[in-house]
């Protein structure tokens, strides 16, 4: 993993504010490593990991004429798992209802798990 730097290779004040500390252990930004997993026109999917507590955040950074915004979620995935699961089919409402029904009927639940 590498630190994320803007094109001029100098951290910007805005970038440091976005990733200023670990959301779990609150350690400062010097203990954070980041890896860009995917880049599109004005957005970056970034995997951020704390060197101190090993917690990870998956964040989407987007830039437009109004500025930069980000959305992140704490995860226990490693960066390679994010790529693996990103390519799987989406969960739909029928999938959720099938799991609910399987959990209601314990015998079917065991069979369902065995078939996966």
Image (tube, rainbow, N blue to C red):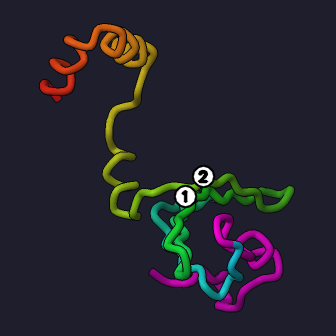
Residue at 52% across / 72% down in the picture? 49
Residue 18 image offset from top left, x and y in percent: 75, 69
- Left-right relation of 110 to 84: left
Against 45, is 111 above or below?
above
Element carrying mark 2? strand
Q: Secondary structure at mark 1?
A: strand
Q: Residue 98 occupies which quadrant of the picture?
A: top left
Is the residue under label 1 in contact with that under label 2 (CB below 8 Å)? yes
Q: Is residue 20 above or below residue 74?
A: below
**Magenta-drawn segment:** 1-25
Q: Residues within 10 Å of mark 1 (few under 14, many from 20)?
A: many
Please tell me which residue is depicted at 13% across the width and 24% down the height of the picture.
115
Q: Is residue 6 above or below residue 90?
A: below
Q: Does the magenta portion include 93?
A: no
**Quick one: label 2, few (<14), some, or many (20+) residues within 10 Å?**
few
Image location of residue 71, percent across then percent down: 68, 52
Q: Residue furthest right?
A: 66
The residue under label 1 is 58
Asked where in the image residue 10 lies, by quadrant, the reply is bottom right
Question: Which image quarter: residue 22?
Answer: bottom right
Q: Residue at x 69, y 57 (%)?
A: 62
> Is residue 111 found left or right of 56 in the rendered image?
left
Q: Which residue is mark 2?
A: 73
Q: Quadrant of the N terminus?
A: bottom left
């Amino acid at each position: 993993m590498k630190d994320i730097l803007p094109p001029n290779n100098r951290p910007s004040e805005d970038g440091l504010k976005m990733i200023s500390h670990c959301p779990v252990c609150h350690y400062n930004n010097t203990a954070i490593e980041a890896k860009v997993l995917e880049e599109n026109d004005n957005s970056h999917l970034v995997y951020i990991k704390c060197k101190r507590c090993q917690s990870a955040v998956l964040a989407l950074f987007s830039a437009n004429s109004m500025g930069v915004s980000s959305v992140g979620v704490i995860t226990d995935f490693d960066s390679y798992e994010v790529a693996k699961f990103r390519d799987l089919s989406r969960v739909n409402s029928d999938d959720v209802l099938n799991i609910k029904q399987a959990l209601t009927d314990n015998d079917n639940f065991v069979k369902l798990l065995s078939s996966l």
